[in-house]
Image: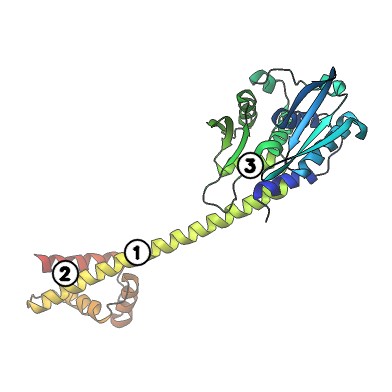
Amino acid sequence: MLSFSKIVKEELIKRKIVHDHNLIYEFQAMTDLLGGIEILDKQDLITFTTSDFSLMNYYIKLSKLLFMVTLDSIKIDQSFIKPYKYYTVLIHNSSNIIDKISFYQPKGINFVNSLDMKQRISYIRGAFLSCGCITNPHSKNYHLEIKSSSLETILTIQALLNSFDLNARVTQMKKRYVVYIKSVKNISGLLSIIEATKSYLELENIISQKNLTKTIHAKMNLEIANEKRCLIKTQEIISCIRYIENNNIILPDDLLVLSQLRLEYDDMSLSELCLKYKEIYGQEINKSTLYRKFEKIKSLATN
């Protein structure tokens, strides 16, 4: 069974794409996080390494679409590091690609401010595809994160995310830096922003179901708690009435009628007892009046 992270990534990879200058920033983010630039035989070489076969093919697809890279310029190496198989894409003769992308430009707030909204979305999408992860939405806690060994890259991603008010935060785990989002509302918002529409709708549906379940459980717990409180109150009043009877304490007529009614219908709530009183005596009595009269009976017994 695919993880939710994998489902989101598969949706993004399989979406229909056309040549769009903004996609360059998606390609750049993927290269920033999982690749780099090397020099081999005095020629620039772009590399990209992943254990995800679909992501490897998508990276190659982007390079062809954006930069007209031909198959004879691409080499794929494979390596095995338990338990994963890794694919490394090598793009030779890549000077024209490097000229179009600001690989050497320092990242940070100035880089973020230089991008328009669509370019920011594209970079975020590429970062998530490369190193992003979302917890199973059926789990108790919600969490989305993107990891990198570069603090500069993580701070850049944080600034990009927060330009959409997603309250992203940064922490360090061993030798890697992590930018993360905890709020389910913001995680849902991110999926919408990067155009993972099906995953966004699935998450919203799960959230709605969980909220409905919580509401039902809360209501049930409240009803149970109320019933328990009513039962305790009823037993207190009945005990007081029996004490009054055993000690020959004289009650006013109205309290005597109600005490007999309470003993006879000891399983009824106050609301039900009001209806029973009207049925027997043909007179209205409300819960507040009934409650006050029972409290009066209780005070007579305890005093």
- In the picture of the structure, the residue carrying the numbered disc 2 is 297
- Disc 1 marks a residue whose amino acid type is Asn
Q: Which label was assigned to residue 34?
A: none
Residue at x-position 72% and y-position 17% = 105
Choose mark 3 or mark 2, whichever is in front. 3
In which quadrant of the rendered image does the C terminus lie? bottom left
With 124 as the anchor, is 258 left or right in this view? left
**Mark 1 / mark 3, whichever is N-terminal:** 3
Choose mark 1 or mark 3, whichever is in front. 3
State yes or no: discs 3 and 2 in contact (Cβ < 8 Å). no
**Mark 1 / mark 2, whichever is N-terminal:** 1
With 227 as the anchor, is 40 left or right in this view? right
- Helix, strand or loop for disc 2: helix
- Helix, strand or loop for disc 1: helix
Q: Which label was assigned to residue 133?
A: 3
Q: Which label was assigned to residue 226?
A: 1
Q: Quadrant of residue 63?
A: top right
Q: Residues within 10 Å of mark 3 (few under 14, many from 20)?
A: many
Residue 259, position as x, y percentages in the image:
20, 76
